Image (cartoon, coloured by chain):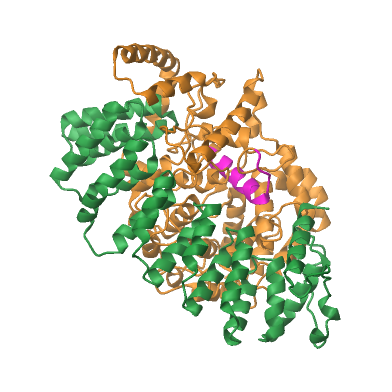
Chain colours: A green, B orange
Amino acid sequence: MTENQKILQKREEELDSDEEQNLLQKPKWVPISKRKEWEDVEPITQKDGPKPPCVVNYSDRYKETMNYFRAVLRSEEISERTLKLSKELLMLSPSYSVAYEFRRNCLFALNGNLKNELFLIEKLLDRLPKNYQLWHHRMKCVEKLNDYSNEMDFLARMMLGDAKNYHVWVYRIWLVKHFQLWDNELEFIEGELEKDHLNNSFWNYRYYVVTKSKTIPLETIYEQEFEFVFGHITKSVNNESPWVYIMNFIKILNKEQLKVLHDKVDELRKRHRHSMWPLFCLFTLYTKYLITEENLDNALTFAKYLGERYDQTRKKYWEKQIKIVEKQKQNL
Amino acid sequence: MASCLHKKAIFTKHDQYYSRTFFDQQGVERRIKEYFILFAENENFHQKIKLSRNLHKKYLLNSLKGLSESNQALDASIPWLIYWTLHSLDILGVLDSEEFAKEFIQKGFVKKAISTLSWCQSKDGGFGGGHLQLPHLAPTYAATNSFAILSRFDPTAISVIDRKKMKQFLLKMKNKDGSFNLHENGESDTRGAYCALSTAHLLQIDDQDVTENTGKWIATCQTYEGGFSARPWREAHGGYTFCAIAALSILGELDKIEMEPLIDWLAHKQMRFSGGFQGRINKLVDGCYSFWQGGVFSFFKDYLNEQTNQDIFKIYQIEQEQTNVKDEEKEIKEEKEEKEKEKEEKEIIEEEKEEEEEEEENEPLDWLEGNYGSVNLLFDEISLQGYILACCQDNRGGLMDKPLKGRDLYHTCYCLSGLSCSQNNLSKEKNPVVLGLEENLVNKIDPIHNITELASNSVKKYFENLNNKN
């Protein structure tokens, strides 16, 4: 049996075990063509041309479900039976965006049970946590349902599987903005950062929350964030995330703030001589915001150390930077 | 160059902070080291580190005959499967081989492929994932690229695409803010913008109504990290960054974004230990980012040269040739001095000690001889090639994400695309830079659409002829 067929078989078994009426005996799939309710529908078979390249070896069950679904798509029939059919198809082919769209139309038109739909989505997401269509489908259903009460728990469960899943964060940002759920978010993200501050998704989300939840100027945010971020940097000086996070603010700082930042980073540089990020941060400060001849010389020393010795992967990047600083020096 | 190809490869530092992210990283790096050591045991490294062309060819041709093993087969659409397979074969040069002519082309393969793809074309324009599926921008992009590749053998392939309806479809997907929905009522993200613009550009329907406002919208997807995300405020990510930059390059609007933070972010996405790229800060290396991240450097080569110094890379090469050997000696000397200095200092922090140990722990894997020059791109092409060739080749053929993961068509396509970008310079005067023997060199790609130059030239020629006729 090929990989493909194994996957399909597994999906078929799952689909069968999902049918509640058959708890005692192993349910048997009844071909749609043998079902009475589908008598009046003529299935449409797939056409790929004579002997197409890249044909997937679909099972008979998948093919038949697809054939009936094509017929339904054409007739645009919205009914209980087509709702059921779309579920059968999605269990077998969970990336098929058209089927979701169709299913939503049915669900909304027939006043279907959207809470049950969320359970179904979650079940499929356990298997396919990175499926675009499922996440989008969930968003549309929750929007329609206008009830977010289960969503935070649901996201917490998804994060247990993979706290960096891009979709989890895309969805959370949508949810928080749509229902204005800012109140506990900062606390939540601080807790998560405590557990794993190497997870950059947390930092990105923190930036979103601190800048969007209140209307305060970036300068104030910087003041509020400074201690927190350097607390994390001190714990792990080689962690790129908080460095990139705090360096984003440099461009808005006044002279006094720049000096405080500089002293803090310079102290870290002295304590951790084999770390790249203090040097990188100082390099930026010296070449863009605290330009003096002495500082440019220091910047050159750092750039040479990084490019030639410590961080040779970025040799060419640092050589480029060195050329720019040398030009800067000439222009002084 | 550094990475595992070099004796100074250093594991990612933990700073005595242990979390799930760190353990994942450590596990992967240990595995990668094992893979590199396989090559260290061989006396002749250059002959040993090679692209397994025949195995990949076999895997890809089998997938053309009928997909049976890729577990994406069920969840991906037919145009994608055809595109990944054909493009990989094109990069490897298989499409121009006698074997392919005999086994496929003479048996009517091109016609069959065109007819399969044309079954995915919607009556309202654009392509779906299969027969009678509603049109979606992603398969539309994949189908258009596939037609471009097929047009090398049958110039009329492009004419199968209904360009007028295609444009209508693209405009229907377009939102007022300039973004594109992937399908009707679907999600909109930078992927959508790229797929739409790449398709429009290749088919020469990228008129003002298709392109206006999109550059502005894409610029709002640049994050504080420097890279680009799917939508505003999300996390910077390799795949979306490629989509954003390629789209802006089509629009000629690279000046709309902040270039310096982008390059800082991008440069730091190449991993010190493996030489491959990660997609986001602190994530794991993945072969597919060889293209998504590595390929982005191709776009602003010219932009950077304009901004600073035209000769910059020339100087670099001369210097490198002259000081190659001396550097090594100097480095050892400096290292000694450094260590003595360290002993004198009483304030040696514990982590530093560990760091030194780690450096010594690394066995010398320094088999690289000679001078590799540069492809003019601001990343370490040789280390990237080292990662792809040593860690991403499945020994059954096909390429993969990282050691111990299985092959699939997606990773085969993007590992090979990344390999091509890192070998071939975009300016015509420069020679390719190849790790291992010359036979590792693959065909050059046009990074805007990610099809080979052969394919993109064939499309251009088709339109030239068409315009001449009219």
Residue B401 x/y as whole percent: 61, 43
Q: Residue drawn 74% across and 81% down?
A: A71
For the view shown, which residue lies furthest in the front direction?
Answer: A24
Q: Residue drawn 37% across and 23% down?
A: B350
B96 relative to B23 in the view: left or right: right
Name the foreground residue: B97 vs A69. A69
For the view shown, which residue lies furthest in the right direction?
Answer: A34
Residue A44 x/y as whole percent: 78, 78
The answer, for residue A175, to whether it is visible in the render is yes
Image quadrant of residue B148? Answer: bottom right
B137 relative to A33 in the view: left or right: left
Name the foreground residue: B321 vs B216. B216
Residue A112's place in the image compared with B140, above or below, is below
Q: Residue drawn 51% across and 20% down?
A: B361
Quadrant of the rendering where the C terminus of chain B is positioned: bottom right
Image quadrant of residue A322? Answer: top left
Magenta segment? B404-422
For the stretch drawn in magenta, the main secondary structure is: helix
Residue B213's place in the image compared with A199, above or below, is below
Residue A161 x/y as whole percent: 56, 53
> How many numbered tags mark residues here?
0
Residue A166 x/y as whole percent: 50, 56
Image quadrant of residue A38? Answer: bottom right
Residue B222's place in the image compared with B160, above or below, is above
The answer, for residue B197, to whether it is visible in the render is no
In the rendered image, residue A254 lying in the magenta stretch gets the answer no
In the rendered image, residue B411 lying in the magenta stretch gets the answer yes
